[in-house]
Amino acid sequence: MGHGVSFEYRFYLNKYKEVLSGIYISPEYSFKKFNLKVDINASDIEHIMQTHNDPSIIPHNYATYQVDAESKINSLGLKFGHQWTTESLSFDLNFAVSRSSIKYNVKEEITYLNTWSEPQTEDIDGNVYYFLPKIEFSIGYKF
């Protein structure tokens, strides 16, 4: 489950800026946050093993497996595009370059069958940074 928000403002470079048509430059920012929770017990694991018949998915000796993960994605970019409008439709084609960062946190807990030991836990934190180009095309309808 997640949520996000994006902001963009277009600077049109033609004479008729009030019709929102033509070539534009647009800075953009977006933020997205995702959460994932998984709680698997021994009967779920047995069902997975019977359904997929693949022992590499989850080892047989897990009694419970829990994961709580969260990621936050920030992107800052610059778009170059062109928008065409008719009486009822708009068409937009743009090229963008953005710098994104992903911050993640994963907490994992495993309990094994037939053991009296405490559950094993692992906490993984990290950041990933990258630059990506993208091309977008959209069609809109005017009300």
Image: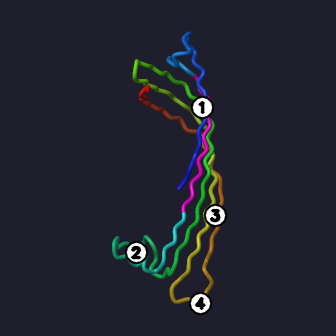
Q: Which segment did they paint magenta? A: 25-36
The quarter of the image holding the C terminus is: top left
On residue 8, which mark appears? Answer: 1
In the depicted structure, whether residue 12 falls above or below residue 116? above
Give the secondary structure at mark 1.
strand
Inspect the image, locate mark 1, and give the three-letter code of the amino acid beneath it. Answer: Glu
In the depicted structure, whether residue 130 falls above or below residue 21? below
What is the CA distance from the residue labelled 4 to the residue labelled 3? Answer: 25 Å
Residue 118: which quarter of the image?
A: bottom right
Q: According to the image, label 3 marks what residue?
A: 124
Which residue is rendered at x = 59% and y = 47% of the image? 32
Which residue is rendered at x = 57% and y = 58% of the image? 35
Pick whichever, 133 or 41, lies toward us.
41
Q: Nearer the viewer, mark 4 or mark 1?
A: 1
On residue 55, which mark appears? Answer: 2
Give the secondary structure at mark 2.
loop
Task: Name the image colouring.
Answer: rainbow
Q: According to the image, label 4 marks what residue?
A: 116
What is the CA distance from the residue labelled 4 to the residue labelled 1? Answer: 56 Å
What is the CA distance from the residue labelled 2 to the residue labelled 3? Answer: 25 Å
Sequence-first disc among 1 and 3: 1
Inspect the image, locate mark 3, and give the three-letter code of the amino acid beneath it. Answer: Ile
Pick whichever, 56 or 3, lies toward us.
3
Give the x, y percent position of residue 73.
61, 47
What is the CA distance from the residue labelled 4 to the residue labelled 2? Answer: 24 Å
Which residue is rendered at x = 55% and y = 25% of the image? 80
Q: Is residue 22 magenta?
A: no
